[in-house]
């Protein structure tokens, strides 16, 4: 069965070219999303198997915001697409744990490799047998895992909020939810200790 691909790309010509490439490779492709909201609408209304997300959408919202939405609300892999491959862009992208990264301009072989690896890895993670400690980690949402990794790096709530472009209150809510899931006492150093002890399980 063909895999359904969502393409988020604000430049129409590039979006159409990528969709044509995907169809030639045997994938089923939705109408390309040109904006953040269009991508969210497709994710919530269609059966999307994998998403290709342009990082820079020429607006306040970016492909990384869509990635965060996917991590929180949909259990599908996503691949970033960008004309930028500088260290800052890579580091920001890593925080959302993409399954692959495509650099513009791309060729058909690059697209095929990125999607097949992403789909394969996602299937493996979904079916992997986990140890008890790993199961604890996998009870956390993707965003919670990102925050725990940053806590393990001794980042403060403000530093985490700044790095992830979210509010400090959102970080605090995530910290509270993590403590509840892990049965840790909030307001102590127990979360920091747990994060450091399990940081290698969060990669």
Image (cartoon, rainbow, N blue to C red):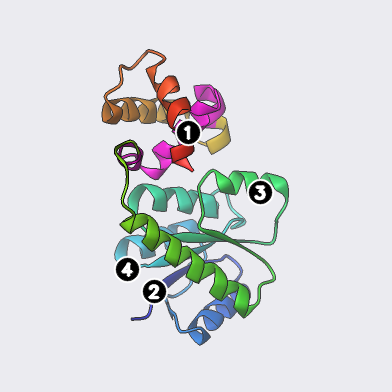
Q: Nearer the viewer, mark 3 or mark 4?
A: 3
The answer to whether 86 appears left or right of 161 in the picture is: right
Of labels 1 and 3, earlier in sequence is 3
Q: Are discs 2 and 3 less than 8 Å apart at CB?
A: no
Image x and y of residue 136, in percent: 31, 36
Residue 127, position in %: x, y? 31, 58
Given contact means CB atoms under 8 Å apart, are the residues at marks 3 and 4 in contact?
no
Residue 167's mark?
none
Q: Main secondary structure of the magenta part?
A: helix
Q: Do residues under tags 2 and 4 come within 8 Å of each other at their CB atoms? A: yes
* Whether residue 15 can be seen here: no
Give the class, few, some or many, for how many residues have Cα within 10 Å of label 3's Cα (few <14, many ≥20).
few
User: Crowding at label 1, few (<14), some or many (≥20) Cα neighbours within 10 Å?
Assistant: some
Looking at the picture, does residue 64 appear above or below residue 198?
A: below
Q: Which quarter of the figure has residue 46?
A: bottom left
User: Residue shown at 48%/37% (left/top)?
Assistant: 200
Which is more N-terminal, label 3 or label 2? 2
Secondary-structure class at tag 3: helix
Part of the protein shown in magenta: 134-161
Kindly state the secondary structure of the residue where label 2 is placed.
strand
Q: Which residue corresponds to the image point at 47% horizontal and 33% vertical from the top-left?
A: 199
Which residue bears the numbered disc 2? Answer: 4
Disc 1 to disc 3, C-alpha distance: 23 Å
Residue holding disc 4: 46
Q: Is residue 64 left or right of residue 102?
A: left
Q: Position of residue 164 (x, y in %)?
A: 53, 37
Q: Nearer the viewer, mark 1 or mark 2?
A: 1
Q: Which residue is mark 3?
A: 89
Mark linked to residue 199 = 1
Q: Nearer the viewer, mark 2 or mark 4?
A: 2
Regarding mark 4 in the picture, which secondary structure is present there?
loop
| C-alpha gap between disc 3 and disc 4 | 29 Å
């Amino acid at each position: 069965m063909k895999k359904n691909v969502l393409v988020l790309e604000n430049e129409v010509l590039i979006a159409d070219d990528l969709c044509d490439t995907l169809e030639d490779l045997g994938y089923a492709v939705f109408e390309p999303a040109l904006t953040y909201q269009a991508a969210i609408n497709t994710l919530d209304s269609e059966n999307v198997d994998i998403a290709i997300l342009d990082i820079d959408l020429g607006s306040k919202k970016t492909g990384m915001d869509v990635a965060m939405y996917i991590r929180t609300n949909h259990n599908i892999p996503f691949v970033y697409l960008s004309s930028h491959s500088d260290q800052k862009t890579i580091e920001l992208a890593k925080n959302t744990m993409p399954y692959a990264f495509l650099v513009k301009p791309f060729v058909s072989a690059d697209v095929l490799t990125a999607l097949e690896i992403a789909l394969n890895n996602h299937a493996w993670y979904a079916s992997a047998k986990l140890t008890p400690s790993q199961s604890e980690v996998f009870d956390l949402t993707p965003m919670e895992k990102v925050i725990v990794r940053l806590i393990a790096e001794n980042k403060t709530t403000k530093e985490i909020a700044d790095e992830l472009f979210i509010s400090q209150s959102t970080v605090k809510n995530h910290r509270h939810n993590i403590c509840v899931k892990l049965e840790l006492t909030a307001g102590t150093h127990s979360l920091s200790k747990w994060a450091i002890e399990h940081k290698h399980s969060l990669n």
